[in-house]
Image: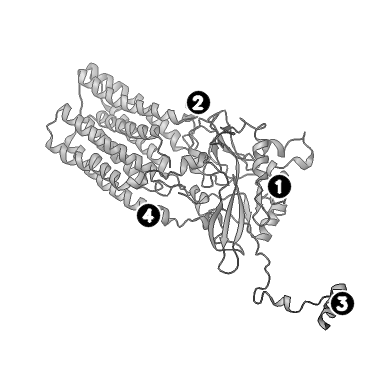
């Protein structure tokens, strides 16, 4: 049924740290790699080695430049994937019941055997989280690696989404936002984790941790430190000798 | 939004078809014999043809039966159910008209109501989307109802009703253009608010795209960011207003009520309707474009 559950036992999701993300695209590649072989139809590419390569991805990393009122511009890398919203607008629009939100953990999934590929869910999503697979004609989206996180055959450290496992800077954190003491809940609380486009009423589970203010040298007299360099050791002796000549 | 030809053809033709079926079901006109066969046949042909065209943009049309299951939440599912219910309810009425069976016309009124419900459901598929501000407004159902009413009346040979609804359509179109043009700006959503980078956290400021996440367009960009040929908007709006509304409103009272006369006016209306529906999609901007710095 495509009616949304009134309550989910857990709220599994990601806290994405915009301060530490370096934009290496490893999460994009890991996501594509894992979802080539596990849950549902493999994510396809069209003309991958040709002139106009294109393909379905569940995670995209944008790159933005912020120009603050004072100081230098800042580059922020911005991963964008399904936010597993509480009021997911993609679910109720589905005519076939293929899109659903799980009561047990809040993950939003697509039953690919029931999807007719009408694309209405992708229209309803403000975040561009869903992409139609051009090969099989069904809608693809982030599964929060539902085939990893509960998988007893994997070592425990691998039971997290592929993007989280692979992130070299630890910018992606996975956990339960329904538990106020979980790492992700604590991170969101301490760092002011925020929702994307909250005015659309989707109540996303994933939280974005804003970039921190960067340390900056005191620019009032940038050459001042050069005026009183005190050479020591051999350089100091040389300085003294040369000064007397 | 990408103006997919199958969706434009579907919404225009089936809207016109269900409009005609509504008039026939209500008994305006109530033909008999072979004229009834052709008149009902035209209504069924347009409605069913449009529905079939709509399956061309599906990834897996063979699973269409599943689309009848989610009427509790989905306008698309409601549309599927209302359309089939309408076609079934009107079948005995059409048969009775054709063969002169003289069956009571009560079911015709039910079918007419279901035809209007179908058009409303089609419109709500678009109007419900908060992600597309231009569509997310009562003018969308008003527009679809007015188009179906005007087109249906012309095909039904109802000069009076056709002229009035065509004039109404002009007013609705003008209102939808006016409100729609400011709809995106009214939501005050920008790259800075969509990412939060312009308004939230210790580092705030003007935000611009530094680098795109991929080098060639993906499904999102192809489907929801459509930049081509918006430059012809004013001309196409003229074609839509004159063809679909002003022309029929002026010509219907002056034209003798012949099949040929109505056919010419219907063709004129259809040209305007296609122009208007193309604009409806091509001009609609999805908020996801903000993340790409494009709309």
Q: Which residue is mark 4?
A: B182
Q: Nearer the viewer, mark 3 or mark 1?
A: 3
Parent chain of label 4: B
Name the disc covering residue A237, or none: 3
Q: Is residue A176 left or right of residue A51?
A: right
Mark 4 and 2 residues: CB-CB less than 8 Å, in contact?
no
User: Which of the two residues, A30 or B130, is positioned nearer the viewer here?
Assistant: A30
Task: Kindly identify the residue that appears in the image at 35 percent across and 36 percent down.
Answer: B119
Q: x%, y% of residue B200?
A: 58, 61
Q: Nearer the viewer, mark 4 or mark 3?
A: 3
Name the disc covering residue A167, or none: 1
Name the disc covering residue B63, or none: 2
Near mark 2 (Cα within 10 A), the count class, few <14, some 14-19 or many ≥20, is some
Cα separation, mark 4 vs mark 3, equals 75 Å
Q: Nearer the viewer, mark 1 or mark 4?
A: 1
Badge 2 element? helix
* Residue B28 in view, yes or no: no
Q: Are marks 1 and 4 on the same chain?
A: no
Q: Nearer the viewer, mark 1 or mark 2?
A: 1
Near mark 1 (Cα within 10 A), the count class, few <14, some 14-19 or many ≥20, is some
Q: Are marks 4 and 2 on the same chain?
A: yes
Parent chain of label 2: B
Q: x%, y% of residue B221?
A: 49, 42
Parent chain of label 3: A
Task: Kindly identify the residue that appears in the image at 24 percent across and 32 percent down.
Answer: B267
């Amino acid at each position: 049924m495509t009616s949304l559950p009134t309550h989910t036992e857990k709220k599994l999701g990601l806290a994405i740290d915009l301060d530490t993300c370096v934009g290496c695209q490893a999460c994009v590649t890991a996501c594509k790699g894992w979802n080539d072989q596990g849950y549902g139809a493999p994510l396809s590419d069209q003309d991958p080695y040709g002139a106009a390569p294109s393909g379905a991805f569940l995670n995209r990393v944008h790159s933005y430049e912020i120009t603050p009122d004072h100081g230098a511009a800042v580059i922020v890398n911005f991963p964008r994937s399904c936010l597993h919203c509480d009021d997911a607008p993609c679910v109720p629009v589905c005519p076939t019941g293929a899109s659903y939100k799980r009561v047990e953990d809040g993950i939003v999934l697509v039953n690919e055997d029931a999807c007719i590929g009408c694309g209405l869910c992708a229209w309803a999503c403000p975040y561009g989280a869903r992409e139609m697979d051009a090969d099989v004609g069904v809608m693809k989206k982030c599964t929060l690696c539902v085939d990893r996180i509960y998988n007893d055959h994997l070592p425990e450290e691998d039971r997290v989404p592929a993007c989280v496992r692979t992130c070299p800077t630890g910018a992606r954190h996975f956990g339960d936002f329904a538990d106020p003491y979980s790492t992700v809940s604590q991170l969101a609380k301490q760092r002011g984790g925020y929702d994307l486009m909250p005015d659309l009423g989707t109540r996303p589970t994933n939280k974005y941790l804003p970039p921190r203010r960067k340390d900056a040298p005191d620019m009032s007299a940038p050459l001042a430190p050069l005026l009183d360099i005190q050479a020591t050791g051999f350089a100091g002796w040389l300085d003294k000798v040369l000064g007397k000549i | 939004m990408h103006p997919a030809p199958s969706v434009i053809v579907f919404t225009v033709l089936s809207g016109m078809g269900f409009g005609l079926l509504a008039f026939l079901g209500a008994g305006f006109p109530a033909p008999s014999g072979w004229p009834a066969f052709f008149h009902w046949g035209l209504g069924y042909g347009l409605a069913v043809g449009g529905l079939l065209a709509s399956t061309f943009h599906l990834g897996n049309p063979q699973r269409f039966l599943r689309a009848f299951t989610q009427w509790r939440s989905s306008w698309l599912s409601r549309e599927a159910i209302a359309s089939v219910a309408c076609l079934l309810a009107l079948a005995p009425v059409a048969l009775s008209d054709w063969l002169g069976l003289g069956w009571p016309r009560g079911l015709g009124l039910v079918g007419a109501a279901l035809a209007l419900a179908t058009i409303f459901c089609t419109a709500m598929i678009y109007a419900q989307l908060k992600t597309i501000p231009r569509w997310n407004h009562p003018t969308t159902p008003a527009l679809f109802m007015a188009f179906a009413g005007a087109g249906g009346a012309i095909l039904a040979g109802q000069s009076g009703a056709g002229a009035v609804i065509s004039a109404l359509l002009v007013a609705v179109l003008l209102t939808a253009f006016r409100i729609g043009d400011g709809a995106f700006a009214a939501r005050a959503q920008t790259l800075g608010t969509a990412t939060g980078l312009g308004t939230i956290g210790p580092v705030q400021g003007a935000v611009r795209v530094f680098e795109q996440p991929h080098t060639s367009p993906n499904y999102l960009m192809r489907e929801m960011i459509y930049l081509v040929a918006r430059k012809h908007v004013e001309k196409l709006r003229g074609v839509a207003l004159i063809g679909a509304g002003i022309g029929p409103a002026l010509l219907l009272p002056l034209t003798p009520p012949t099949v040929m006369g109505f056919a010419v006016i219907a063709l004129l209306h259809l040209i305007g309707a296609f122009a208007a529906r193309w604009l409806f999609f091509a001009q609609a901007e999805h908020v996801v474009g903000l993340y790409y710095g494009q709309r």
